[in-house]
Amino acid sequence: MQDAIHIHVNGEARTWRSGATVAELLQDLDIRTERVAVELNLEILDRATFEQRSLKDGDRVEILSFIGGGSL
Amino acid sequence: MTDDRLIIAGREFKSRLWVGTGKYKDFAETKKAIEVSGADVVTVAVRRVNITDRSKENLLDYIDPKKYTILPNTAGCYTVEDAVRYSRLARAAGVSDLVKLEVLGDERTLFPDTAGLIEAAKILVKEGFIVLPYTNDDPIVANPYNLKIIMEMIKVPIIVDAGVGTASDAAFAMELGADAVLMNTAIAGAQDPIAMAEAMKYAVHAGRLAYKAGRIPRKLYATASSPIEGML
């Protein structure tokens, strides 16, 4: 078992395994990678880099998607 | 109206009625109302994914991005930074370069912060976004003259958003020369949203046809259309 890290995902504190990538995080959370945007410490990630970007202690991840709305 | 397409930034749109996707009872109703309205552009908001309850369905499972142009907006943004951030996130989420840009200045009326809107628009245009800025003049029915003046003065397409309550409002906006009408609450909040979606489709179509046809001058009283000649 690798070391645990403490991260924030959409504002919620989570304990995750060290070295996990963004792609693995999405997979573990059961979130399909298409049509979501991921921000890692305020940097918007290119979808193509999800598998390369690994998470470290203290990271703040935001995962966003489209919902109903958009007009008044 | 195949020869009367709405063109924005080189993209052609069939319908001049654009609709929002908020406030419906469920996704099934959203889907049905959009189908009935004939709209080919639908607006969406960008929000955090619910990471604890993954049973929630995704809007885009119901609204096929291949069939509709998805127009993300920056609803709820009160600063340039937020509006730019949400726009970039929307693009990263991968539907298009279009964004309906809102930089709001007043919580009660949802009127725009015009200076902030211009600043945010400049940043986004430089980054290759097609920006549809949400700005005054609204409410249309209260002051149609302002809208008419804006339409005379600027050359980009104008889409009337907000302030529409029923079919005649939508037809009126189109008769004034608006290029399209965007609405959400008037349909989603109607007692029968599906029926209202259909009414809006015809209203926008009728208003556009009337605008193109050119109305007769306003008069205070009736004019006889039957000749006097030949009367007994």
Image (cartoon, helix red, strand yellow):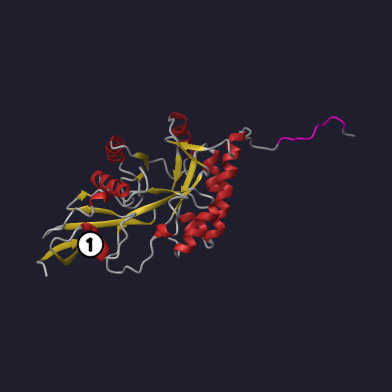
| Quadrant hosting residue B99 | top left
* Residue at the (57%, 42%) spot, across then down: B207
Q: Is residue B44 left or right of residue B164?
A: left
Q: Residue furthest right?
A: B232
Which span of residues is magenta-colored? B223-230
Residue A64: x, y in percent? 29, 56
Q: Is residue B139 left or right of residue A52?
A: right
Return the chain for callout 1: A
* B130 relative to A17, above or below: above
* Residue at the (57%, 58%) spot, across then down: B195
Which of these two is toward me, B103 or B87? B87
Verify whether residue B226 appears in magenta: yes
Verify whether residue B99 appears in magenta: no
User: Tag 1's secondary structure?
Assistant: helix
* A62 relative to B14, above or below: below
Residue A8: x, y in percent? 17, 62
* Residue A71 visible to the viewer: no
Which of these two is toward me, B91 or A2? A2
| Quadrant hosting residue A24 | bottom left
* Residue A60 visible to the viewer: yes
* B58 relative to B160, above or below: below
Q: Is residue B164 left or right of residue B219?
A: left
Residue pointed to by mark 1 = A25
Residue B65: x, y in percent? 43, 51
Main SS, magenta residues: loop
